[in-house]
């Protein structure tokens, strides 16, 4: 399902609505949310913080799994994705801090950590709703072009383009880690429902491939075409090549 929105606030509401309905649907047992970092979902997280504060929307009992983490950064590191999600979302709502889980970027054996992370998600009963952004080269989480469409959580080498794209968060491009732990494309597709959000011209080519391209590891996001329930929330600029 493709939802083209007029502005960032309409996009934020559409993504927040999906999360809110997942929370309500799981009442009692607690929802398992899959959270993405990057700037794209932040307006939706801000909207959910508002609903929590002003409308009493509760996240109590729910759990959250992050998509990815940089190898070499501990959870508390300023640029770690774990810290990003706490600062931009989870520390402002009533989710248990210990229930927000990310791959451990400081693990001594990243490959073993990757396998253990996949297992943790399975043990939690799987993800009810996965939020996704998309990289300008069509990556999702950190599954760069060439990633196996069936991959599980794994250690990935980042492309030069992704390192450049993400350098804005670091002091200098040389400080951007070159490897990450990332849920695989197969892991991501195990989520029961997926919402991908993107905005801006820079994402237009990747969005066009995601929606209309042939399924190929060349554009990892195309693997989402194999999933039965994906909502794509994009602005006019990101939709401009459809
Ligand atoms: C990073 C993350 C992805 C994210 C992408 C796009 O590479 N690993 O999960 O989708 O950036 O980020 P942004 O939303 O800031 O454009």
Image (cartoon, grey):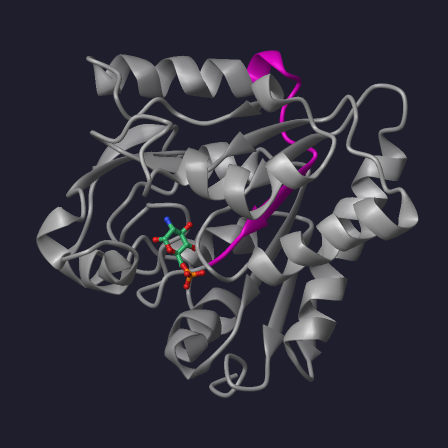
Q: Is residue 149 magenta?
A: no
Image quarter for residue 232?
Answer: bottom right
Q: Nearer the viewer, residue 9 or 56?
A: 56
Image quarter for residue 191?
Answer: top right
Q: Nearer the viewer, residue 77 or 82?
A: 77
Horizontal side, residue 241 vs residue 153: left or right: right
Instruction: Name the spot of residue 166 as percent of width and height, x first.
Output: 28, 58
> Where does the magenta region start and end?
122-133
> Residue, x 73% and y 26% (percent of image)?
62
**Residue 29 to residue 141: above or below:** above
Q: Most extreme residue toward the left, as rendered?
A: 174
Ligand 1 found in image quarter: bottom left
**Residue 51 to residue 100: above or below:** below
> Residue, x 56% and y 41% (percent of image)?
35
Horizontal side, residue 191 vs residue 66: left or right: right
Horizontal side, residue 89 vs residue 94: left or right: left
Instruction: Name the spot of residue 135 as percent of width and height, x first.
Output: 37, 61
**Residue 174 to residue 57: above or below:** below
Horizontal side, residue 95 vs residue 211: left or right: right
> Residue, x 74% and y 31% (percent of image)?
94
Q: Nearer the viewer, residue 176 or 242?
A: 176
> Residue, x 57% and y 63% (percent of image)?
197
Instruction: Name the spot of residue 229 as percent of width and height, x first.
Output: 69, 50
Instruction: Name the spot of residue 6 as percent of width and height, x first.
Output: 69, 84
Image quarter for residue 128?
Answer: top right
């Amino acid at each position: 399902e493709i939802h083209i929105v007029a502005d960032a606030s309409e996009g934020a509401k559409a993504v927040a609505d999906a999360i809110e309905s997942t929370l309500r649907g799981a009442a009692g047992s607690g929802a398992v949310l899959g959270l993405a970092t990057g700037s794209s979902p932040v307006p939706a997280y801000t909207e959910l913080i508002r609903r929590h504060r002003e409308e009493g929307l509760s996240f109590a009992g729910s759990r959250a799994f992050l998509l990815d983490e940089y190898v070499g950064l501990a959870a508390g590191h300023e640029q770690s994705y774990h810290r990003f999600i706490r600062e931009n979302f989870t520390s402002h709502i009533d989710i248990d801090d210990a229930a927000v889980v990310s791959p451990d970027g400081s693990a001594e054996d990243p490959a073993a950590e990757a396998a253990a992370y996949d297992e943790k998600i399975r043990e939690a009963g799987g993800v009810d709703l996965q939020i996704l952004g998309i990289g300008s080269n069509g990556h999702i989480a950190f599954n760069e072009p060439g990633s196996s469409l069936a991959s599980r959580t794994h250690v990935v080498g980042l492309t030069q383009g992704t390192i450049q794209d993400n350098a804005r968060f670091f002091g200098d491009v040389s400080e951007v880690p070159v490897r990450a732990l990332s849920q695989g494309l197969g892991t991501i597709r195990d989520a029961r429902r997926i919402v991908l959000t993107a905005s801006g011209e820079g994402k237009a080519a990747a969005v066009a491939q995601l929606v209309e391209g042939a399924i190929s590891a060349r554009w990892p996001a195309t693997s989402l075409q194999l999933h039965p329930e994906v909502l794509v929330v994009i602005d006019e600029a990101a939709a401009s090549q459809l």
